[in-house]
Image: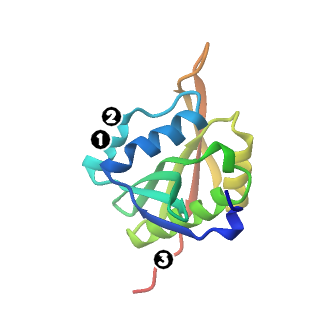
Amino acid sequence: MATTEEQQISYRAMSAEDLSSVLEIETRAYAFPWSAGIFKDCLSAGYDCRLLCLGSQVVGHAVLSAAAGEAHLLNICIQRELQGQGLGRVFVRHILRRAELLGAGRIFLEVRPSNKKAIRLYESMGFMQIGVRRDYYPGDPAKEDALVLALQLEPVEA
């Protein structure tokens, strides 16, 4: 496989036909992955479900909910083997732009306190912790809290 620098990055909307690829990425990356049903519900609800592609290969996915001037990044995932190569930052930038285009002035997300790499990424992009959701994430043996982060977005010029 060519390096990420040699392949063209593109984005597209997720569809039900993409769920097998999405689930493979999700289950390899997370100990407690989302189910097919959750992704189907997000698609049915009209959430902004996006894919990150290198060439023709799907290598990441994200789910964004936007309403009433706010957005919530519900899920973002990069293929495990490609993590640490800057794709997460590129994809988050894309999602932030999508949130702005959808009229959001602020975006929220939750992250596990144990996910130090993600926390560093989000903080380097300007996200700030605004709260904690106790026992939010499933765990083994105990549930894990979620740090709630937020970022003020730039208004999009018409």
Question: Residue 59, how many percent across, how many down?
Answer: 55, 53
- Left or right? Give the position of 150 relative to 121: left
Which numbered tag is attached to residue 155? 3
The answer to whether 90 is drawn above or below residue 88 in the figure is below
Residue 149 vs residue 31, the one in the foreground = 31
Using the image, tell me which numbered label, if any, was put on residue 111: none
- Sequence-wise, the earlier of marks 1 and 3 is 1
Residue, x 38% and y 49% (percent of image)?
18
Residue for point 73% across, 59% down = 124
Label 3 neighbour load within 10 Å: few <14, some 14-19, many 20+: few
Mark 1 and mark 3 in contact? Answer it, CB < 8 Å. Answer: no
User: Which of 157 and 34 lies nearest the eye of the viewer?
Assistant: 34
Label 2: which residue?
A: 37
Contact (Cβ within 8 Å) of mark 2 with mark 1 = yes
Q: Residue furthest bottom?
A: 158
Element at label 2 = helix
Disc 2 and disc 3: Cα gap in Å? 34 Å
Residue type at numbered disc 3: Pro
Above/below status of 48 relative to 145: below
Location of residue 130 in the rendering, given as x and y in whole percent from the top left corner? 60, 47
Of residue 20 and residue 76, the one placed in the foreground of this image is 20
User: What amino acid is labelled 2 in the image?
Assistant: Gly
Query: What secondary structure is marked by label 3?
Result: loop
Q: State the SS at label 1.
A: helix
Q: State the image quarter where residue 9 is shown.
A: bottom right
